[in-house]
Amino acid sequence: MKTTKHALLVALVLCVAGSAASAWPTDRTFGPYLQNPTSTSMVVCWVTATAGPSTVTYGASPALGSTVTSAAPVKEHQVALTGLTPATTYYYSVSGAGFTGSGTFKTAVLGATPFSFVAMGETHTEDAVGGFAEEVLAASPQLIVDASDQVDSGSSRDEWDRYFTIGGAFYPHVPVLNAVGNHTYLFSNGYPLPGSMGTAEFKRIMNNPGNEEWYSVRSGNTQFIALNSTWYFENPSRIFKQQKDWLKSTLAAATDGVDDPTYKVVFMHIPTWSSGPLYREALERLAMRKYFMPLFETYHVNLVIAAHDKLNEHSLKSGVHYAQIATGELGHPVETPNPNSLFVEPAKRAILVVDVAGGAMTCKFVSSEGLVLHSWSIPASAP
Ligand SMILES: [Fe+2]
């Protein structure tokens, strides 16, 4: 029976989900942070405990000069700055509902101008993520890609407060593209919320384009594609039919000869290939291999970034590179035979630093001590 199967599945998933939420003192006031970056726009965000207006003052020098104001009383302040100059550093300050803050950002480069980005995963509001501040800022990244799980319980605003506070050294300066993960769906008691209800708080906090779960952002010569890989808390036809159709048309448009990106980078939470725990194999990875991997291969996606198994791994299959990242939580065993694995590091936290140039992307797993644990190069087109 369908219902019984689903109940069993949810029970199993609960067993394998990460630790339940901890309690932290929080004021549910945090930011600023940056969303939805393009070469000519940026969305400046902050969250306040009580509703109020929003003001952002900004400019290409510390003197600022331009102001955008919204009188509407909100707790989730999301102010779009438009008409910006590409590849330019901007300074900004925010105020509203009793909150003040400031930061800087750089708009995306155009064309083939080299740039860098950083990828994270499995941060889970671990304090250790703050230990990567120096490494993140040293990379001068154009953006951060977060393959989730960002927090333990995605419906808890306290945890999003914690997430942006721990990364307070870099989120006011580097826009972050967030993927949905299994913990996005968890209520603060650790139980899943059904279907799209589970992503409601994620969507209030984030300002991703499209439906905010699967979306595409072009940055320089690279197209970043976010996917929602958490099918087991979802309506599978939504994930595997609607999303797959969207992915296929997005990848087709990226390879139709009209303004095509040089590189295509997919990020999603569940890995296709992993040396992680055996018990995850049937439920999770196989679905990703069946529904998404053929499209990655057909359309020559260069790099797929994932997380979930709490280890760092680089795999290569049919010309597609897979990077699995653990920046916060660690600790799952290496026990699944992965014939495509080129590197696996289960004992050290890492971020992925990617330098994008015309001829190749260079990827490095970097520890919080600044050590390069593993590096490789990805050519512009598949072999
Ligand atoms: Fe996960």
Image: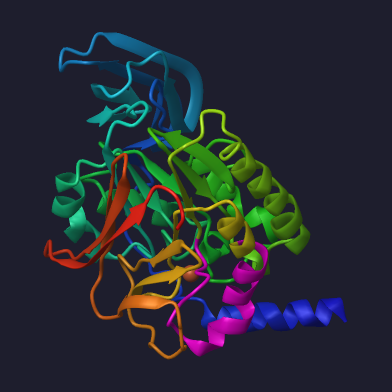
Determine if the magenta segment contains residue 371: no
Residue 351 in view, yes or no:
yes
Residue depicted at 12% across the width and 61% down the height: 370
Above or below residue 14? Residue 86 is above
The part of the image, by quadrant, that contains residue 297 is: bottom right
Please report the bounds of the magenta region as a residue range: 269-292
Q: Is residue 337 left or right of residue 362?
A: right
Placement of the C terminus among the 4 image quadrants: bottom left
On screen, residue 7 above or below 245: below
Task: Reply above or below: 70 against 139.
Answer: above
Measured as percent of width and height from the top left, residue 30 is found at 33, 42
Q: Is residue 116 left or right of residue 324?
A: left
In the image, taking residue 382 as reference, residue 248 lies left or right, namely right
Q: Is residue 99 above or below residue 136?
A: above
**Residue at image point 55% right, 65% down:** 182
Q: Residue at x 51, y 28 (%)?
A: 259
Give how far across and how far down residue 215 sits, in percent. Answer: 56, 42
Front residue (pair 96, 199): 199
Question: Left or right: where does residue 220 sit relative to residue 267?
Answer: left
Decide which of 226, 31 is in the foreground and name it: 226
Percent coordinates x, y for residue 304 in the rendering: 46, 59
Question: Where, quadrant-wise, is the N terminus in this rendering?
Answer: bottom right
Relative image position of residue 280 (x, y in whole percent): 55, 82
Return the residue nearer the eye: 248 or 283.
248
